[in-house]
């Protein structure tokens, strides 16, 4: 496709999804209110299912170890983003950029905390996603790709939401009750909407597997690949 290798396209989409989540996911928007419980979500909710879908496609075609390599690349990208944000916000601004210095430092300083939260949540959730998907593939073989994709996504995304939300949004100057209400109000819709998006994207897993596989034979549940 346009002279690009298929797996390179997968990696590029994966990195794109990570950067969208890290740099733009700080914003939350209201969904609905039930009495004292205000349900909200991060805008990252629209990009995260893509990451889990891509790892499922890679696991199906190239095996668990290649998918884990993709996850490690994602963690490396987040770590580099944190280090870069810390350096760039620490540098003094020139007089010409004084107008935007405060907003720039506020946004990217906040991204450092979100990046740290993402590393922890991302590592746990993506590792769980690959492990659950691969285990289901051992038991079901080639059957039930839709089931394997969604079960692994539901489990991993709940863990991701729980860990990420607590680390990213816990207000140290707020009461425990206030934090609990706000965090619970994000976790519930965040996970449910991501599950719905995962179901919607299920056909894309089949399309992605067929496109990426091409003439490549299906990979076994546990495959050995070259390491860097």
Image: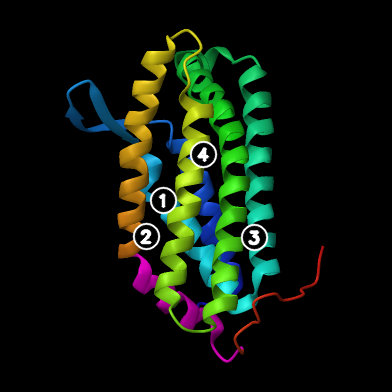
Task: Give the distance between the C-alpha atoms of the residues marked 4 and 3, in whole angstroms.
Answer: 17 Å
If you read the primary sequence from the N terminus, does the residue marked by circle 2 or circle 3 appear first?
3
The residue at 68%/25% (across/down) is 87
Instruction: Please tell me whether mark 4 sits on a helix, a strand or a loop.
Output: helix
Residue drawn where x is 29% and y is 32% of the image: 40
Residue span colored magenta: 201-216
* Main SS category, magenta section: helix
Question: What residue is shown with label 3?
Answer: 70
Residue 131 percent across, percent down from the top left: 61, 62
Label 3 to label 1, Cα distance in Å?
17 Å
The circle on residue 169 is none
Q: Give the class, few, some or many, for how many residues have Cα within 10 Å of label 2's Cα (few <14, many ≥20).
A: many
Nearer-N-terminus badge (2/4) = 4
Mark 2–mark 3 distance (CA, rounded to whole Å) = 19 Å
Is the Cβ of the residue at disc 1 closer than 8 Å to that at disc 2? no
Q: Residue at coordinates 64% horizontally, 14% vertically from top-left?
A: 92
Looking at the rendered structure, the secondary structure element under dot 1 is: loop
Distance, label 2 to label 4, CA atoms, is 20 Å
Measure how far apart labels 4 and 1 are at the Cα level.
Answer: 10 Å
Label 1 neighbour load within 10 Å: few <14, some 14-19, many 20+: some
Is 63 on the left or on the right of 14, as rendered?
A: right
Q: Is residue 147 above or below residue 173?
A: below
Q: Which mark is residue 47?
A: 1
The residue under label 4 is 22
User: Mark 3 or mark 4, which is nearer the start of the sequence?
Assistant: 4
* Quadrant, the C terminus: bottom right
């Amino acid at each position: 496709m346009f002279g690009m290798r298929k797996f390179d396209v997968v990696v590029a989409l994966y990195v794109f999804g990570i950067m969208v989540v890290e740099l733009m996911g700080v914003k939350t928007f209201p969904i609905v209110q039930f009495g004292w419980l205000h349900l909200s979500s991060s805008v990252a909710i629209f990009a995260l299912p893509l990451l889990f879908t891509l790892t499922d496609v890679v696991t199906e075609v190239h095996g668990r170890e290649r998918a884990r390599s993709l996850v490690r690349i994602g963690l490396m990208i987040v770590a580099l983003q944190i280090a870069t944000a810390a350096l760039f916000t620490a540098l003094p601004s020139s007089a010409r950029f004084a107008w935007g210095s405060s907003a720039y430092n506020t946004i990217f300083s906040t991204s450092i905390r979100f990046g740290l939260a993402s590393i922890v949540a991302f590592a746990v959730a993506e590792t769980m996603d690959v492990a659950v998907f691969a285990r289901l593939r051992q038991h079901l073989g080639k059957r039930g790709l839709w089931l394997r994709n969604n079960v692994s996504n539901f489990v991993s995304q709940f863990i991701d939401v729980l860990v990420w939300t607590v680390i990213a949004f816990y207000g140290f100057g707020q009461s425990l009750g206030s934090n609990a209400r706000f965090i619970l109000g994000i976790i519930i819709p965040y996970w449910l909407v991501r599950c719905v998006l995962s179901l919607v994207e299920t056909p894309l897993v089949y399309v992605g597997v067929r496109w990426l596989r091409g003439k490549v034979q299906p990979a076994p549940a546990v495959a050995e690949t070259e390491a860097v």
